[in-house]
Image: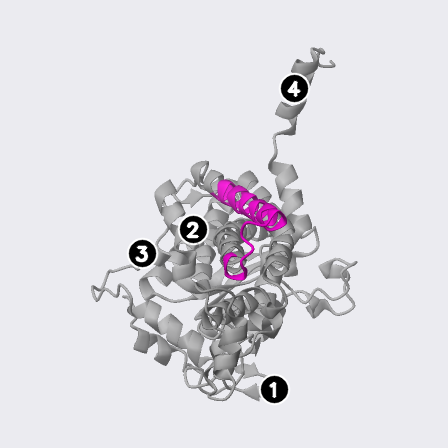
């Protein structure tokens, strides 16, 4: 049965342990930093609410067609990041279930049952994958501190006890379940680190430490984007947490540990690619708007920069379209985006995102950083002078141009813009991870055969 927004708010008061800036947060919905993201999630719960007992929300249904996959990508912004991550988590599990079924059919069935249960209860799920890692030059089993990677510390007839931490987990404190999976491929002897499971956010021993890029200024109108939409990032600690058998997807079988990471990487990257397609269009739009406001839209080097930006935006969207159009399907009928186009597109976007922001800032000028506040514009003594000098021509008043600078700053600089820049690079793994998967999915044999054909050289025996 679907939840309402009010039921979602109440569901957060379940004894979960969340800290922010050194303080335990007893009431997430009432906290000044958490209130905005909680209210946003509640509004999404109320949207398209259906009171029928068997109703399943469209935004967390299993994606089963090319059209639904395209809709999933196009509506990523409307869904907000927690809802998008929930859908991606479910699709990750269904993708992994299909890939482990031959070896572990009971586990695959358990995964599918858990996804159906989550859909029926209308809960939110986040992805706990990145471990603390300790000494990055050493494998999990070689660490000085064995807790550097989440691992099983005790096995009981009814389940396991896990210990460790997962980092960079967006919105964990606002979720209901923590999808916890290995961060990388495991080797023989690393059975204890080959653990995949679903942990309730309020499970005893789960401790969440949050950071949030929400603006804390008295007047938040200089942050027209991040003041309305922000989300905490979580440091999730599993301090000897018991996980019952019915919530375990993988325990041991190190040869299968990477399946979960690779499945998640695919869905994280298609989500990141969809977000970048929208972001690149917005950056190009901002560049054109501020060029026009500055009176420079016809200057050659400005036009050249904008043309480069729109080419980048077009190529990122083309990769997204190709990943959707060339999707495949699991044995259960779930749609899976094309891995080559997903990874190549995500790599291209992450590699060129900083150049897009650089060119936008170069086109806009220093007022991106220094434009006076909205409160200054409203000041009776200096506001009219600010509007006078921030204006450029009859059709562009100072108020409009100043607010445009605020939006560009908030979208590309400041705490919100910095968060987005880092997320674009790191979500789904960094550039090297995307390059590896792209190389692995590219048909090099076909390329070699084509080269020999073009050269009219016989293929070596």
Q: Assess whether mark 4 and mark 2 are in contact (beta carbons under 8 angstroms).
A: no
Q: Which secondary structure lies at badge 3?
A: helix
Point out residue 387 in the picture as x, y percentages from the top left corner. Answer: 49, 76
State the separation of the CA atoms marked 2 and 4: 35 Å
Q: Identify the residue at horizontal 38%, vertical 71% (top origin).
A: 41
Residue 53 marker: none
Closer to us: 263 or 149: 263
Rendered view: 130 above or below 213: above
Mark 3 surroundings within 10 Å by alpha-carbon count, few (fewer than 14), some (14 through 19), many (20 or more): few
Determine which quarter of the picture holds residue 58: bottom left
Point out residue 73 in the picture as x, y percentages from the top left corner. Answer: 43, 51
| Numbered disc in front, either 2 or 4 | 2
Point out residue 442 in the picture as x, y percentages from the top left corner. Answer: 61, 34
Q: Identify the residue at horizontal 43%, vertical 41% (top origin).
A: 330
Q: Assess whether mark 3 and mark 2 are in contact (beta carbons under 8 angstroms).
A: no
**Which residue matches tag 2?**
73
Q: Which residues are magenta?
A: 292-320
**Which quadrant would the N terminus be assigned to in this image?**
bottom left
Q: Identify the residue at horizontal 50%, vertical 89% (top origin).
A: 381
Q: Residue furthest front?
A: 394
Dot placed on the residue nearer the N-terminal end, 4 or 1: 1
Residue 449 marker: 4
**Which residue matches tag 1?**
22
State the separation of the CA atoms marked 2 and 3: 14 Å
| Numbered disc in front, either 1 or 2 | 2
Rendered view: 95 above or below 174: above
Residue 58 marker: 3
Q: Assess whether mark 1 and mark 4 are in contact (beta carbons under 8 angstroms).
A: no
State the separation of the CA atoms marked 4 and 1: 61 Å
Does the magenta portion include 299?
Answer: yes
| Numbered disc in front, either 2 or 3 | 2
């Amino acid at each position: 049965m679907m939840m309402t927004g009010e039921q979602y708010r109440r569901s957060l008061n379940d004894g979960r342990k969340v800290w922010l800036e050194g303080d335990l947060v007893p009431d997430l919905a009432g906290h000044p930093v958490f209130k905005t993201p909680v209210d946003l999630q509640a509004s999404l719960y109320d949207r398209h609410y259906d009171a029928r007992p068997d109703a399943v929300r469209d935004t967390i249904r299993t994606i089963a067609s090319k059209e639904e996959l395209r809709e999933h990508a196009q509506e990523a912004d409307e869904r907000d990041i927690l809802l998008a991550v929930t859908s991606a988590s479910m699709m990750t599990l269904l993708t992994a279930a299909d890939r482990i079924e031959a070896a572990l059919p009971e586990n695959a069935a358990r995964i599918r049952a858990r996804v159906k249960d989550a859909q029926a209860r209308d809960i939110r799920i986040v992805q706990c994958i990145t471990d603390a890692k300790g000494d990055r030059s050493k494998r999990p089993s070689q660490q000085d501190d064995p807790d550097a990677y989440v691992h099983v510390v005790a096995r009981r007839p009814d389940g396991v006890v896990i210990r460790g931490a997962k980092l960079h987990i967006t919105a964990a404190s606002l979720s209901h379940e923590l999808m916890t999976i290995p961060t990388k491929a495991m080797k023989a002897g690393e059975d204890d680190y080959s653990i995949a499971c679903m942990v309730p956010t309020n499970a005893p021993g789960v401790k969440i430490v949050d950071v949030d890029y929400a603006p804390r200024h008295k007047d938040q109108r200089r942050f027209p984007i991040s003041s309305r939409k922000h989300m905490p990032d979580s440091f999730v600690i599993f301090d000897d947490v018991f996980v019952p058998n019915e919530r375990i997807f993988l325990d041991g079988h190190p040869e299968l540990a990477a399946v979960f990471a690779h499945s998640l990487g695919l869905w994280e990257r298609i989500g990141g690619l969809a977000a970048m397609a929208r972001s690149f269009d917005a950056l190009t739009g901002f560049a054109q708007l501020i060029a026009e406001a500055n009176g420079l839209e016809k200057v050659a080097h400005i036009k050249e920069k904008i043309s480069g930006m729109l080419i980048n935006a077009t190529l990122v969207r083309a990769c997204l379209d190709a990943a959707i159009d060339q999707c495949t399907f699991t044995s259960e009928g779930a749609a899976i985006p094309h891995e080559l186009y997903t990874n190549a597109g995500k790599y291209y976007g992450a590699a060129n995102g900083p150049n897009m922001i650089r060119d936008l800032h170069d086109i806009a000028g220093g007022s991106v950083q220094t434009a006076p506040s909205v409160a200054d514009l409203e000041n009776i003594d200096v506001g009219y002078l600010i509007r006078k000098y921030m204006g450029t021509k009859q059709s562009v008043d100072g108020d409009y141009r100043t607010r445009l600078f605020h939006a560009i700053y908030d979208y590309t600089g400041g705490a919100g813009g910095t968060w987005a820049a880092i997320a674009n690079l790191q979500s789904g793994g960094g550039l090297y991870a995307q390059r590896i998967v792209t190389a692995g999915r590219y048909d090099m044999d076909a390329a070699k055969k084509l080269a020999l054909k073009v050269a009219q050289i016989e293929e070596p025996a």
